[in-house]
Image (cartoon, rainbow, N blue to C red):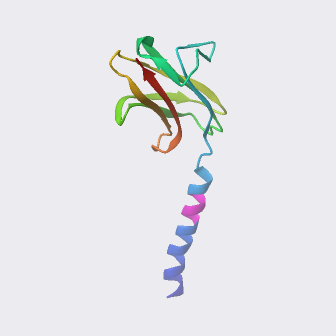
Amino acid sequence: MKKVFTLPIILMVCTAFAVAAFASDMQVEDSAIGEDVVNREVVSEGDSFPASVGKLYCLSRIANIENHTEVVHAWYYGSNERARVRLNVSPPAWRTYSSKIIQDHEVGVWRVEILDTDGNLLETVRFQVTQ
């Protein structure tokens, strides 16, 4: 009888260790919103932009990448998701960016949520668009 209960417990413990061993420590080392990206750096970085800006870029530097994977930049205007961009990243660290066209009437609070492939939030970058 003891062996019947021992096997499931051993399997649960082994599974827990396996999940912990494969859990990623991937993190956003740095992120910024700006009017362009040149030589892997944000140009005209800020947290407030005029509605006439036309297009904005979100650059994120991802660290502690264990395997080739993706991150997601989810662009939100208020509570509405306006774009979802999947971006490839590779070990050990990677810089990547996405862009979003900003229309003249999209004045208000914006954010970009940086997510891992499981949808876990790594970081939120907030900015606003003004008249």
Vertical order, 26 against 129 (above or below): below
Q: Is 16 in the magenta?
A: yes
Vertical order, 38 against 47 (above or below): above
* Camera sees residue 80: yes
| Magenta part, dominant SS | helix
Where residue 41 sits in the image (x, y, percent)? 63, 17
Where residue 72 sits in the image (x, y, percent)? 47, 33
Which residue, as the protein is rendered here, is positioned at the far bottom? 1
Where residue 27 sits in the image (x, y, percent)? 61, 39
Instruction: State the residue at coordinates (56%, 62%).
Output: 16
Where residue 50 sits in the image (x, y, percent)? 45, 15
Of residue 54 and residue 108, the one placed in the foreground of this image is: 108
Instruction: State the residue at coordinates (44%, 22%).
Output: 129
Q: Which residues are magenta?
A: 14-18
Counting the numbered discs, the total is 0
* Camera sees residue 73: no
Vertical order, 64 against 109 (above or below): below
Of residue 1 and residue 118, the one placed in the foreground of this image is: 118
Vertical order, 37 against 111 (above or below): above
Of residue 47 and residue 123, the one placed in the foreground of this image is: 47
Quarter of image, res 6: bottom right
Q: Is 26 in the magenta?
A: no
| Residue 113 in the figure: left or right of residue 39 | left
Instruction: State the residue at coordinates (49%, 88%).
Output: 1
Name the quarter where the C terminus is drawn. Answer: top left
Instruction: State the residue at coordinates (59%, 37%).
Output: 67
